[in-house]
Structures are given as structure tokens and as C-alpha cells.
Amino acid sequence: MKVAIMQPYFLPYIGYWQLIRAVDTFVIYDNIEFTKKGWMHRNNILLNNKKTLFTLPLKKGSDFLNVADRVLADDSEKQVSKILAQIKNEYQKADFFSEASPVIRDIFLYADKNLFEYIYYSVQKICEYLHIETKIVKSSEVSIEHELKGQDKVIKICESLGAKAYLNSMGGQNLYEREIFHGRGIELLFLESEARLYQQFNKGFISHLSIIDIMMFNNRESVGSMLEDYTLI
């Protein structure tokens, strides 16, 4: 069985979804410290044909809170509505806007203001839309000593789930040692995404955007094909 473990990101780029598709069980950390400089509450879309960052508004809280303890701002509806309006204004002429926009709107309008649950819902909805059948598990639900850190924690999660292979993105190459994984009976593999160009608005291609962009310009079958565009190293 193949397992991947990642932080909870909000509507991330296609490499994240390739990783989910490539494994049998995908574990999302809910008992991990929130980082405001990461991608848990923000991402990039096209706006006026430029890569533009949108950010979910969060209630003020300690920088040391776990993501499961962070919540959207009390008046988040106002900012969320603004983001949805920007998405509509930018993408309404995209070929698959009418197909993809109800899913995106449903995600942004999710009623639960808990940040992790908000992200978790978005992952479930995108997987459903793209016909990804991978089992999604919250890290806190895995029976291990959760005080463990880094590589030790990853290996314990893999062992608890009965994993024979652990997949990570290329960015994790300096975090893990193959010999240690192999010594525990687990194959360590890294997924190298081979991002495919696709037609945007005839003004050149802008890469590394949220999955929102891909869904607006490609039908589900095309995106499903893109999910296979990777190499395991």
C-alpha cells in the first residue's frame, strides 16, 4: 500500500492532487502548527492575466496554534464574496467555467469556519470532482505517538497504516533518508510533477496556479489525464 502525508493546503497546484491520486491513503496533518507564510489559507489565481494571491481572512490568534485551532474571521463572508467575485470576473469566459464554478463556489461558501475543516472539505470536494478515490485520513486519527517529529513521525504513520511505500513531493528530498525507510520495510519515493501546458486566454502561459485555474480551462477528463503526468523517483 502506498501512503502520502502532507500539510493541509487550500486549493493547491496540480502536484498536490497528483500525489493524492498516486497513493492508496493520503494523510492530511491536522495536528500541525499553522504557518502564515505557507499555503494553508492562500493561493494564486489569474487576475487581469497576472498571477495574483488571494488569502482567506483569519481570526487573530497565536502563531503557535495548530491549524485545527485556527478559524476564519467573524466577517470572513465579505472577503470570501470578494474572492468569488474576482474569480467570476476573471474566468467567466473560460471554456469550463460553468462546469467548475459551482464546485469552487461551494468550497468557498462552506459554513464551517474552522480552518482545517474548511480545507479538508475542499480536498474532499475536488477529489470528488476529479474522480479521485484515494482514502483521505486526518493525521490525528492515526494511532501513533503524536509528539514525534519529522521523519520519525512519518515512519510511524506509515507503519500504523501498513504502508509498503511512502510518496512525497520533490521538495521533501532533503528531509528523508531512503536507508532508514528501507530498514523499516518502506520504499521511499518522490513524485516529480511534469506540469502540462494548457490554453489560458491567448496571452502566454502562467504556471503554478491554484487547481482553480486548471479546472476553469480544462474538462474533468483532461485534468484526470494531467494527474498522471508525473515521474516517481
Image (cartoon, rainbow, N blue to C red):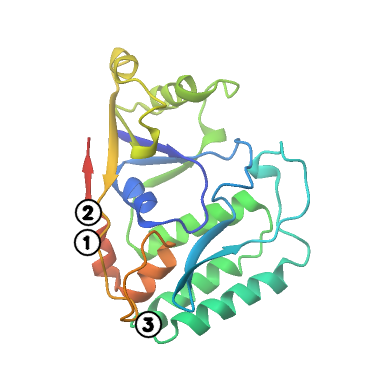
Front in this rendered view, residue 24 or 197: 197
The total number of labels drawn is 3
For image coordinates 30% across by 73% down, the residue present is 218
Foreground: disc 1 or disc 3: 3
Quadrant where the C terminus sits is top left
Disc 1 crowd rating (10 Å Cα; few below 14, some 14-19, many 20+) is few
Q: Give the alpha-carbon distance from disc 2 to disc 1, as whole Å.
A: 7 Å
Residue 172: x and y in percent read: 39, 33
Q: Earlier in the sequence, mark 2 or mark 3?
A: 3
Q: Earlier in the sequence, mark 1 or mark 3?
A: 3
Q: Is residue 47 visible?
A: yes
Residue 58: x and y in percent read: 71, 56
Residue 68: x and y in percent read: 65, 43
Are the residues at dot 2 and dot 1 in contact (C-beta closer than 8 Å)? yes
Amino acid type for the residue under numbered disc 1: Ser
Element under disc 1: helix
Q: Which residue is mark 1?
A: 225
Residue 229, numbered circle:
2
Q: Which residue is mark 3?
A: 94
For image coordinates 64% across by 43% down, the residue present is 67
Q: Is residue 15 above or below residue 182?
A: below
